């Protein structure tokens, strides 16, 4: 992906405008917190 121009970060949650991603199932609690914060407008 890096060769295609993507930037890879090793974080439990990454937010880029409207895209919220995480790495593994172990990161689900942090991912859910970020989704909830995004939906609530925070």
Image (tube, helix red, strand yellow):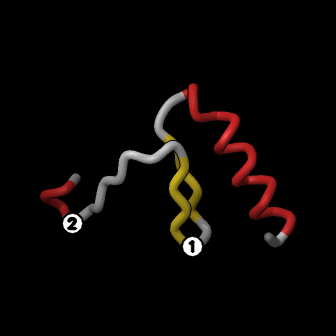
Image check: 13 left or right of 34? left
Q: Within the image, what quadrant is residue 30 found in?
A: top right
The quadrant where residue 8 appears: bottom left
Residue that carries the numbered disc 2 in the rendered image: 5
CB under 8 Å between discs 2 and 1: no
- Horizontal placement of 36 versus 4: left or right? right
Looking at the picture, how far across and down is residue 34, in whole percent? 70, 53
Q: Looking at the picture, does residue 21 appear above or below residue 5?
A: above
Quarter-wise, where is residue 28 in the image?
top right
Q: Picture coordinates of residue 25 (x, y %)?
A: 57, 27
For label 2, the SS is: loop
Residue at 45% x, 47% y is: 11
Question: Residues under labels 2 and 1: Cα distance?
Answer: 18 Å
Q: How many marks?
A: 2
Query: Which residue is pictured at 57% across the width and 26% down the height?
Result: 26
Left or right: 25, with 35 as reference point:
left
Assess disc 1: are there few (<14), some (14-19) or many (≥20) residues with their C-alpha within 10 Å of its C-alpha: few
Q: Quadrant of the C terminus?
A: bottom right
Residue displayed at 58% across by 56% down:
20
Q: In x, y percent, where is residue 10?
A: 37, 46
Residue at mark 1:
17
As helix, strand or loop, the secondary structure at mark 1 comes to: loop
Tell me if mark 2 has few (under 14), some (14-19) or many (20+) residues whose alpha carbon lies within 10 angstroms of its own.
few
Q: Name the outermost residue toward the left.
A: 3
The residue most toward the right is 40
Q: Which tag, 2 or 1, sits closer to the chain's start?
A: 2
């Amino acid at each position: 992906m890096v060769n295609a121009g993507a930037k890879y970060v090793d974080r439990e949650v990454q937010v880029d405008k409207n895209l919220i991603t995480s790495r593994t199932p172990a990161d689900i609690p942090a991912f859910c917190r970020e989704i909830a914060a995004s939906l609530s407008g925070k």
